[in-house]
């Protein structure tokens, strides 16, 4: 176990503006979206989620949906899991996206 095993990775969830639903690619990825639920981006990072969100908004290694439609982080959905080792964060990113989709959210993941 080297440096990668240290618990300094984070999952994070960004609320997206409702206008993201106008993008066909986003709609097609969310066939079970429930009207009224939030639209979100779920990611993982070795940075503090606030720093990563700022980079998305600045267009640095950005997801286009977060850059163009990202409103704010939703720490109530992820803070309980952080920090964690890299592999755990990779797995949690997928699991969290699945759980939010099952709850009717519109979800995008890289």
Image (tube, grey):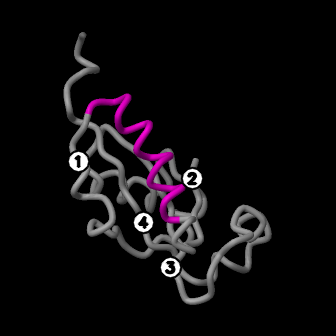
Which of the 4 image quarters holds residue 58? bottom left
Q: Which residue is mark 1?
A: 82
Q: Which residue is mark 4?
A: 14
Q: Which residue is mark 2?
A: 109
Relative placement, left or right, of 84 versus 94 is: left
> Where in the figure is residue 81, as x and y percent of width and height?
25, 50
Q: Which residue is mark 3?
A: 38
Mark 4 closeness class: few <14, some 14–19, many ≥20 residues within 10 Å: many
Residue at 31 percent across and 59 percent down: it is 78
> Where in the figure is residue 47, as x and y percent of width and height?
28, 42
Residues in magenta, as a range: 85-100
Say which of 64 and 36 sits in front: 36
Q: In terms of sequence position, does the residue under pointer 1 or pointer 4 come before the other?
A: 4
Relative placement, left or right, of 7 versus 58 is: left
Relative placement, left or right, of 50 versus 45 is: left
Residue at 50 percent across and 46 percent down: it is 94
Residue at 20 percent across and 25 percent down: it is 6
Q: CA distance from mark 1 to mark 3?
A: 22 Å
């Amino acid at each position: 176990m080297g440096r990668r095993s240290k618990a300094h990775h984070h999952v994070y969830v960004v609320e997206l503006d409702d206008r993201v639903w106008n993008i066909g690619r986003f709609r097609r990825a969310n066939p079970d979206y429930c009207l009224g639920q939030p639209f979100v981006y779920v990611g993982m990072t070795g940075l503090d989620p606030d720093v990563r969100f700022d980079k998305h908004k600045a267009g640095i290694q950005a997801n286009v949906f977060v850059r163009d439609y990202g409103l704010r982080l939703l720490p109530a959905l992820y803070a309980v899991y952080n920090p964690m080792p890299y592999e755990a964060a990779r797995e949690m990113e997928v699991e969290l996206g699945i759980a939010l989709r099952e709850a009717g959210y519109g979800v995008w993941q890289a």
